[in-house]
Amino acid sequence: MAIASAVPVSVEPDFYHTKTKYKGILGWIFTTDHKRIGILYLVTMLVFFFTAATLGVLMRLEMLTPGRTFVDAQTYNTFFTLHGIMMIFLFIIPGLPAVFGNFLMPIMIGAKDVFFPRLNLLSWWLFLFGGIFALVSVFLPGGAADTGWTFYVPYSVRTSTNVIPALSAAFILGFSSILTGLNFITTIHRMRAPGMTWFRMPLFVWSLYSTAWIQVLATPIIGITLLLIAIERWFGVGIFDPTLGGDPVLYQHLFWIYSHPAVYIMILPGLGVVSEILPVFARRTIFGYKFIAFSSLAIAFVGSLVWAHHMFTVGMSNTGMFVFSFLTFLVSIPSAIKVFNWIATLYKGSIEISAPLLFILSFIIQFCIGGFTGLILGTLAINIHVQDTYFVVGHFHYVMFGGTGFGLFAALHYWYPKMFGKMYKQAPAYISWFLATVGFNLLYFPMFVLGYEGMPRRYYDYLPEFQTVHQIATVGSWILYAGIVVMFVNLVVSLWRGEKATANPWGGETLEWKVPSPPPLENFDEIPVVTTGPYDYSKYEKAAQEVK
Amino acid sequence: MSSHAAEAAPHGHTHRDDVGSKMGMWLFLFTELILFGGMFIVYAVYRYMHQAEFHLAATELDRLVGTVNTIVLLTSSLTVAMSITAIQEGKKSLAMFLVGMTLVLALAFLVNKYFEWDHKFTVGLYPGSPELVNKPQGVVLYFGLYYVMTGLHALHVIIGMVVLAVMMGFIRTGTIHKGSYVRLEAGALYWHLVDIIWIFLFPLFYLLH
């Protein structure tokens, strides 16, 4: 992004080496600097991610043979419950907005911090406490919750396991998510640098803006719903208890009114990362900027109206089913607009292969598979057949892991030099990408086959004829895990051994590449004045024309 | 990069932007409205399913108590709004008095609510009581919702009181003054939220029968 004058070389120390009010660890956990809070989120989030990923690998291991492989059925139930709660509430929802949004969004719009820095710190503390609640529920007498992450009634009211700590975890994490959302909306409205108009904002910021609105408007519903389960367990009020007149289906509606929009909280920032990284490595101005920006808002809006497509087999009027099916299909339009624009951006670009771009390319393909299988699931007749089977699990993981997860890996490789001031080794990064992509597809693609043939999700046992396909998936989980381990070993080792990164190693044009790596405490010596859009690669495009 | 640019968006930690601060508060109030919105959905669904029984159960509530509480809460919203006018005119002790009045009225609301709940418990109308369990399901749900919704509202009254008490301290120490009162406005906005939710709870539970 061209700005009125070049940013002078900063003489200030970077934010890691600026003197803070408190020393050592206190300087981190009581910081109000958005960059430090971003790093705090990154570290805590990765701890939860590795715990949940390990649980996932253990689940696959249990599925290696029919019947008992190494754990009993009850333990398996707690595995998938914890895997779901931790991956969703502690990894995917906060992953991109809280880590990269916090670190980069203020820099990208030319601000020195978020609007409410202390509230930002409170969000992280709530996130930490929520995570601790989730972990503690495992070790308290009574055993870890075994309801699945959906907490469906009446089972969640009746089971003797520690549902309340798990609910509290989700409730507190919801609070954290709301506060981050309202902080981001206010920041984007009020703190953009002079000349940073709405249509000069980087597309990652647009996706964070759409996400923040869903966080603010949808999360309170899950708050009240989870609170009602807790009240039901404590006092037996009867609101969801059929023996007292309550309606369990109403619970499912309330749950999905939040939890479906929540999947867009998870995927929208991932889509934003793709739009951010593609133009840099294609050396092309992004194709269809406004369409990509508005499609985020469109996904946020339409996505809020499709929740009952999770409930086609629960009992609903035909009219209701048609309406929800139709709206579900509508979501594919803004999603497809994004994909077409990405492809058009790559077309005739001067593509430079690098680790972030490779993850992005995997993202696009896997997101498409996830999206198409979503359409299959949205079709009423087929949905009845594959409801609650591995087909749904496959679809969900293709979008959430193949999409958002890979988007997060891409973001990590793209912004790593900016965040840590070091460059990682390329070869291990390529290897990790290869292993992760192969492992991922080997793990989740067989699930479509299993689901189509009738393997129900969450089952501990299965028929012998499913064994081969289950084993392929399990082998895939090992390759994927190996890829992730290689990736993080490379990134962590590079913190010490990596070469010093320059301010702009990729040739990015957005504002974060105009400040030193890592940025100084206040990001900018002087607030920049912005004069052009975010992805101005016209000079490269002109050069490419001349070659022809 | 001109010096005017630096003025337009000053330092992130010390800048002052009252419009932005209030925007954050409004966003938070949206989330509170939606939180209660979830309860109102549940109420609407069960009222639709058990119309006659909701009608019958509502006769158990005392309209007089509800009306008195409505008047008390509306008056408290008036006093907190007046406190902002007072601080705008620099009348510090008047502003403190008016916030204090709001707290007294809020306390009166809670005391009234306590006696109302206490009476219900004495006649055996509480979740899980032998008397209530034997009544029709619509009545059980009505009282379940009554306790959950008015209870959640009372919790918000208490939170609002804590917020306003802190604001009173800020006025006393001079953190809130004639030139800077956005905190008091935010606190008052929260108090109005507590008020407006009651404005919906009152007819739904006390008047519709």
Image: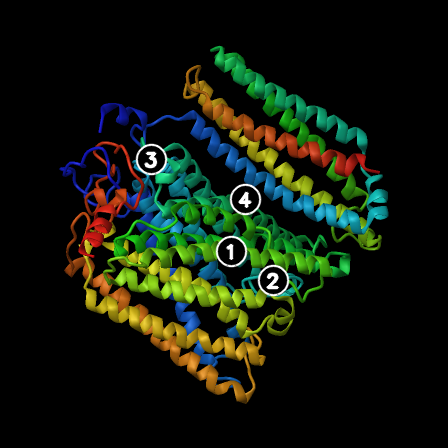
Question: In what quadrant of the picture does the N terminus of chain A appear?
Answer: top left
Pick whichever of labels 3 and 2 is earlier in the sequence: 3
In the rendered image, residue B55, in percent from the top left (x then y), is placed at: 84, 43
Query: Mark 3 sits on what residue?
Result: A196
- Provide the residue designation for mark 4: A217
Disc 3, disc 2: CB below 8 Å?
no
- Residue A277 x %, y %: 31, 54
Q: Are marks 3 and 4 in contact (CB under 8 Å)?
A: no
Closer to the camera in the image, B131 or A150: A150
Q: CA distance from mark 3 to mark 4?
A: 26 Å
Q: CA distance from mark 3 to mark 2?
A: 40 Å
Residue A131 visible somewhere in the drawing: no
What's under tag 3, amino acid-wise? Met
Residue B74, quarter of picture: top right
Label 3, secondary structure: give it: loop
Q: Amino acid at mark 2?
A: His
Q: Are marks 2 and 1 on the same chain?
A: yes
The residue positioned 29% from the left and 68% from the top of the image is: A433
Eye-nearest disc, 3 or 2: 3
Where does label 2 land, which residue? A310
Q: Of label 4 and label 2, which has the lower sequence position?
A: 4
- Classify mark 2: helix, strand or loop: helix
Say which residue appears at 47% left-offset and 52% top-offset.
Answer: A265
Horizontal arrangement in the rendering, residue A476 relative to residue A249 (left or right):
left
Chain letter for mark 1:
A
Q: Which quadrant of the figure contains the C terminus of chain A?
A: bottom left
Query: Which disc number belongs to residue A333?
Result: 1
Task: Give the total of numbered labels.
Answer: 4
Dot 4: element = helix
